[in-house]
Amino acid sequence: MANAAKSRPTPSELHERAERLLYEVLMLCNTAALLDENAGRDDGWKELTQYMAVVESFLIHTRSLLGFLYPPKRVLERDKRKRTEVYAFDYCDPSWRARPWKEIATVRNTIRRDIRQLSLAHLPVARSGEYARVVAALKAGLASFLDDAERLSAGAKAQLRAALERSGGGAGKRADAAHMPMPIPAIPVPSRSAVAGSGS
């Protein structure tokens, strides 16, 4: 029992986690409301909810692509991977590796911390310049990967290159959704009546 008591969080840690819990509940309820086609037009919460959801999405997708280009040591040094894991070097010559990036560990840790600590009080996008540099480096790494990805189909390469060129903050022109090479699948939006009917 004594060891269990020692491992319990401190009052300040409990306070911090309560703030995070509030954030998680707000985001759960507010993003669900955004998916509801019958939700009220605007009570002042929508813009902030959408903004925070975009921040979270940006961090998660950046972390995913960093993992794709720069696999963990267990994969590179010990060839230990989960059956479903696929990395950039799988599409290239077996010896291919993404160009070394000395800040990769720092960037990974920063993103991990931001995802873990994200709250209304700690907006990581205050460092938007820092993330712009991460995006530029990531896009350069992906462009280099596409140059050497022999096992990637020509169609997939073309779509990926178009996505990199179309995105902001880099070379290339922006394109609207009508000119996208691959349609974005629609997200089903539940209505209140459908949700209410499913519970009966």
Image (tube, rainbow, N blue to C red):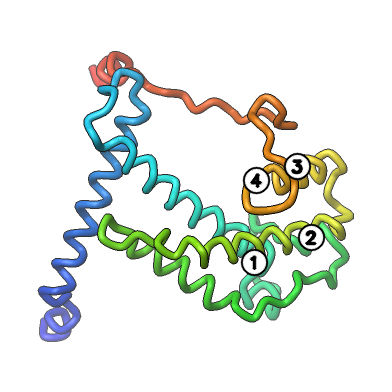
Amino acid under disc 3: Ala
Amino acid under disc 1: Arg
Q: For mark 3, does the 10 Å Cα neighbourhood hold few (<14), some (14 to 19), or many (20 or more) residues?
A: some
> Which element is circle 3 on?
helix
> Which element is circle 4 on?
loop
The label number, if any, that marks residue 162 in the structure image: 3
Residue at figure coordinates x 43%, y 52% from the top left = 56
Q: For mark 2, does the 10 Å Cα neighbourhood hold few (<14), some (14 to 19), or many (20 or more) residues?
A: many
Task: Read off the residue under disc 1.
Answer: 81
Amino acid under disc 2: Phe
Decide: marks 3, 1 in contact (CB < 8 A)?
no
Q: Earlier in the sequence, mark 1 or mark 4?
A: 1
Amino acid under disc 4: Ser
In the rendered image, residue 128, in percent from the top left (x then y), is placed at: 48, 61
Q: Earlier in the sequence, mark 3 or mark 2?
A: 2
Q: Earlier in the sequence, mark 3 or mark 1?
A: 1
Decide: marks 2, 4 in contact (CB < 8 A)?
no
Mark 3 and mark 2: Cα distance apart in space: 14 Å
